[in-house]
Amino acid sequence: MQPRLRLHIISRKKLLEAARTHRELSEPLDVWYRIAKKSKWRSLAEVRQTFPAADAVERFTVFNIKGNAYRLIAEIHYRTGRVFLRDVLTHAEYSKGGWKR
């Protein structure tokens, strides 16, 4: 069994940019970041213990942010403990599906 590694978030810059664009996201994204960086997830099931609404979409994990108004899209490499942030989108932007390309 592999050891539980603390997660390394790459890159927080995406969160800060989203918070600048959407001021109401500053606190929810900061809360997500603080929880995620202390986590030691090894599977989607473990992610869902912390964030029950997290979903797997292809190779990404999608988190609902601010009461489902926004989506945080991340690629989690459980073996290495790295979380690559892809995007933070409004629900409407996410639904268009362009982020998958």
Image (spheres, rainbow, N blue to C red):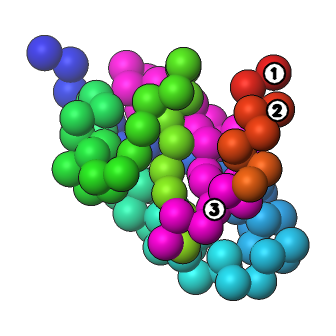
Where the C terminus falls, by quadrant? top right
Residue at 42%, 55% in the rendered image: 36
Instruction: Give the prevailing secondary structure in the magenta stretch.
Output: strand
**Residue 78, quarter of the rendered image:** top left
Residue 70 is marked as 3
In the rendered image, residue 21, in percent from the top left (x then y), is placed at 86, 72
Sequence-wise, the earlier of marks 2 and 3 is: 3
| Relative to 7, residue 25 above or below | below
Mark 2–mark 3 distance (CA, rounded to whole Å): 15 Å
| Relative to 70, residue 93 above or below | above
| Relative to 85, residue 51 above or below | below
- Residue furthest toward the left? 1
- Residue that carries the numbered disc 2 in the rendered image: 98
- Residue that carries the numbered disc 1 in the rendered image: 101
- Residue furthest toward the right? 21
Sequence-wise, the earlier of marks 3 and 1 is: 3
Evaluate if marks 1 and 2 touch, with contact meaning CB atoms under 8 Å apart: yes
**Residue 10, quarter of the rendered image:** top right
Q: Amino acid at mark 1?
A: Arg
- Could you tell whether 34 is left or right of 12 in the image? left
Q: What segment is highlighted magenta in the picture?
A: 67-91
Residue 78 lies in the magenta stretch: yes
Residue at 83%, 64% in the rendered image: 17
Residue at 60%, 51% in the rendered image: 72
Q: Amino acid at mark 2?
A: Gly
Mark 1–mark 2 distance (CA, rounded to whole Å): 6 Å
